[in-house]
């Protein structure tokens, strides 16, 4: 099995795109507002190698995410090829009516095209250069299914037009299993990524994640801490935290990364370096204490309702 806790996950090549690594942590840019540029710069400088943003001004400042990325690149802290850059197309109902990066009365195809072009401008590598030639997104995600499956497929087909040049991989967020199944069956470019809330109300997406594993789709967990206070109380969370000398929150991240083909969105503002160090500490402890780690993972899987062999 592929666990992002121990190995770098690789997205399989699709529709002309070469295989690509995806980091265990993607820095989540939602709700960072005017601090987005500074926080993205800080994240990349601290060791994060992925950023998750969206063409949705209501909750994201994609322009400032690009500014922070360019600053880190310009200072030589990181190269663009080392960063997994992910953005999203957000349909009209998810947008602020007064600030939409496309014409809301246009066709879905035209909306997607304008949104992606806006993302490419915002996330360009060179400051002051409006020409987006050569700019690309590692991943473009539908922020959620549209109002009907037909419209969802129309948006997906519009996204497919950008693969493999301006966009390398496609994904979908906030999706139930039935929509994912239909999308996968009907898509020419198959989804490589699913980004969902990982929490009790969806049964921790056990069946959906199984579908993803069987097809090599990487699952991106968000709300990993916010919605999972109960998982903090599992006895083995404290046990691993004490043994590896890390905070319980880091253990929850590592439990999730211990699931197959799963990475985590991490939007911390104050614990970037400690979260990355904590990940390494748990990784080292788990390798040196495989029996104890497997036992802890078994209890974690029991807590989320997942059966099967231990990690």
Image (spheres, rainbow, N blue to C red):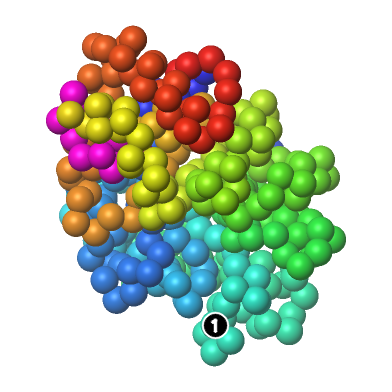
Start-end of magenta stretch: 243-253
Q: Position of residue 109 (x, y in %)?
A: 74, 68
Residue 142: image location, x then y, percent: 63, 58
- Is residue 154 visible in the rendered image? The answer is no
Residue at figure coordinates x 48%, y 16% from the top left:
310
Residue 239 location, quadrant? top left
Which residue occupies 18% across, 35% down?
Answer: 246
State whether residue 68 appears in this view: yes
Q: Nearer the viewer, residue 136 or 244?
A: 244
Name the one closer to the observer, 198 or 89: 198
Residue under the point 43% across and 53% down? 227
Q: Is residue 246 magenta?
A: yes
Residue furthest to the left: 245
Image location of residue 151, percent across then percent down:
80, 64
Picture residue at 60% right of the left edge, 68% below the top: 90
Query: Relative to 28, is 193 on the left or the right?
Result: right
Residue 210, compared with residue 184, is above or below; it is: above
SS for dot 1: loop
**What crowding class fits label 1: few (fewer than 14 Cα within 10 Å), some (14-19), or many (20 or more)?**
few
Q: Is residue 94 above or below residue 187?
A: below
Q: Quadrant of the C terminus?
A: top left
Of residues 287 and 41, the one nearer the viewer is 287
Can residue 94 be found in the magenta stretch? no
Percent of width and height locating residue 278: 21, 35
Q: Is residue 149 above or below residue 210?
A: below
Q: Name the residue beneath numbered marker 1.
A: 96
């Amino acid at each position: 099995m592929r666990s992002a806790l121990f190995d770098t996950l690789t997205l399989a090549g699709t529709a002309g795109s070469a295989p690509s690594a995806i980091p265990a942590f993607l820095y989540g840019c939602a709700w960072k507002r005017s601090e987005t540029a500074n926080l993205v710069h800080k994240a990349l400088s601290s060791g994060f190698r992925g950023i998750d943003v969206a063409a949705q001004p209501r909750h994201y400042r994609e322009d400032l995410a690009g500014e922070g990325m360019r600053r880190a690149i310009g200072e030589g802290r990181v190269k663009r090829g080392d960063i997994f850059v992910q953005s999203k197309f957000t349909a009209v109902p998810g947008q602020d009516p007064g600030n939409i990066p496309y014409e809301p009365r246009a066709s879905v195809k035209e909306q997607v095209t304008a949104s992606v072009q806006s993302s490419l401008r915002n996330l360009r590598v060179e400051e002051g250069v409006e020409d987006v030639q050569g700019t690309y997104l590692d991943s473009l995600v539908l922020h959620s299914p549209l109002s009907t499956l037909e419209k969802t497929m129309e948006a997906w087909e519009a996204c497919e037009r950008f693969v493999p040049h301006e966009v390398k991989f496609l994904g979908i967020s906030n999706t139930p299993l039935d929509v994912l199944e239909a999308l996968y069956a009907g898509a020419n470019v198959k989804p490589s990524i699913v980004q969902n809330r990982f929490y009790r109300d969806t049964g921790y997406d056990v069946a959906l994640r199984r579908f993803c594993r069987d097809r090599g789709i990487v699952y991106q967990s968000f709300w990993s801490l916010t919605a999972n206070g109960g998982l903090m109380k599992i006895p083995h969370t404290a046990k691993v935290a004490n043994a590896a000398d890390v905070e319980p929150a880091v253990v929850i991240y590592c439990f999730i990364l211990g699931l197959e083909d799963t990475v985590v969105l991490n939007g911390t503002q104050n614990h970037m370096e400690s979260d990355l160090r904590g990940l390494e500490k748990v990784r080292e402890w788990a390798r040196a204490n495989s029996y104890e780690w497997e036992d802890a993972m078994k209890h974690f899987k029991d807590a989320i309702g997942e059966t099967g062999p231990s990690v």
